[in-house]
Image: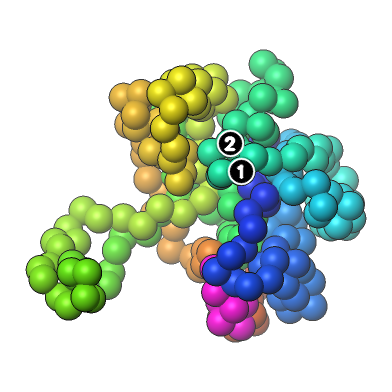
């Protein structure tokens, strides 16, 4: 399996580049690369980033990719364009591709392996967790105007893993239509292929706001990172 890490965002909500933020003494991106590389099923990685970050990304990859091959690709103006840029560099010899948000440094090799197992059965799978919060709709004034039944609702995570040919087909259709998606599940759904959900019970926080870094540090400190043997 090939891992494609999306690391080309501008971090507008953070106010600084979240992938370079220190997390337990290492940059967020260092942790994300290491987590994917630690999975025995991952044979190589592609990091999609911005040109101005290429040198730093290469440095982090050299330190945390555990000797696995890494290619650095420049991303596009939107997430789906960055994923497409990475997909275009993959050869026909790649059977499955795992697309992962580089801002999710807490993913474990166990979760990656579990999601891949489902993808091998169904052709498409995503890490996810059931929505547990009470959901409400609000009007333009942010006043509650109704409720949302959370039965059957899941929050999507990454990695999202697909047969390479399927994901390429979904993205070709997406680009031809001129549309955009915020994750690969949406692109594959649009071509009529069902996506299996891997219930990830481990912390897989996405770093979005400054406070998330401190929370991620607490999560890292509170668990022992699974070994590669655990991920088998």
Residue toward you, 173 or 77: 77
- Residue at position x 53%, y 38% in the image: 80
Determine whether, in the image, residue 204 is placed left or right of residue 186: right
Label 1 Cα neighbours within 10 Å, binned few <14 / some 14-19 / many ≥20: few
**Callout 2: SS:** helix
Specify few, some or many for label 2: CA neighbours under 10 Å numbering under 14, 14-19, or 20 or more. some
Q: How far apart, in angstroms, are the residues tagged by discs 1 and 2?
A: 7 Å
**Residue 67 in the image: above or below residue 130:** above
Residue at 68% x, 41% y: name it: 75
Picture quadrant where residue 190 is located:
top left
Please report contact status of discs 1 and 2: CB closer than 8 Å, yes or no: yes
Where, by quadrant of the figure, is residue 223 drawn?
bottom right
Colour scheme in the image? rainbow
Q: Position of residue 165 (x, y in %)?
A: 54, 19
Q: Residue 9 placed where, x, y %? A: 63, 54
Instruction: Give the left or right position of residue 197, taking residue 152 as reference.
Output: right
Task: Please tell me which residue is depicted at 51% across the width and 51% down the height of the picture.
Answer: 158
* Residue 41, position as x, y percentages in the image: 66, 39
Q: Is 195 covered by the magenta stretch?
A: no
- Label of residue 77 in the image: 1
**Magenta span dominant secondary structure:** helix
Q: State the mark number for residue 206.
A: none
Q: Position of residue 168 (x, y in %)?
A: 54, 23
Figure check: 181 above or below 139: above
Against 164, residue 140 (above or below) is below
Which residue reaches farthest left?
146
For this rendering, which residue is in front, 105 or 136?
A: 136
Please give the range of residues in magenta.
208-214
Where disc 1 sits, the SS reads loop
Q: Disc 2 designates what residue?
A: 81
Question: Considering depth in this image, is 193 or 141 the residue closer to the camera?
Answer: 141
């Amino acid at each position: 399996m090939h891992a494609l890490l999306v690391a080309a965002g501008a971090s507008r909500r953070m106010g600084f580049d979240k992938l370079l933020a220190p997390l337990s003494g290492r940059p967020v991106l260092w942790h994300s690369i290491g987590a994917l590389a630690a999975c025995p099923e991952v044979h190589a990685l592609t990091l999609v980033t911005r040109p101005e970050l290429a040198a730093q990304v290469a440095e982090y990859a050299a330190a945390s990719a555990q000797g696995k091959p890494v290619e650095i690709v420049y991303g596009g103006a939107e997430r789906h364009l960055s994923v497409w840029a990475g997909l275009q560099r993959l050869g026909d010899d790649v059977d499955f591709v795992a697309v992962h948000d580089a801002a999710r440094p807490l993913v474990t090799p166990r979760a990656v392996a579990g999601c891949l197992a489902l993808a091998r059965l169904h052709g498409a799978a995503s890490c996810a967790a059931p929505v547990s919060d009470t959901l409400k709709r609000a009007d333009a004034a942010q006043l509650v105007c109704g409720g949302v039944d959370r039965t059957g609702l899941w929050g999507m995570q990454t990695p999202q893993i697909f047969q390479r040919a399927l994901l390429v087909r979904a993205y070709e259709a997406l680009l031809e239509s001129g549309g955009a998606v915020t994750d690969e599940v949406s692109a594959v759904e649009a071509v009529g292929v069902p996506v299996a959900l891997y219930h990830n019970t481990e912390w897989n926080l996405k770093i979005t706001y400054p406070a998330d870094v401190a929370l991620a540090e607490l999560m890292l400190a509170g668990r022992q990172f699974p070994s590669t043997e655990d991920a088998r």
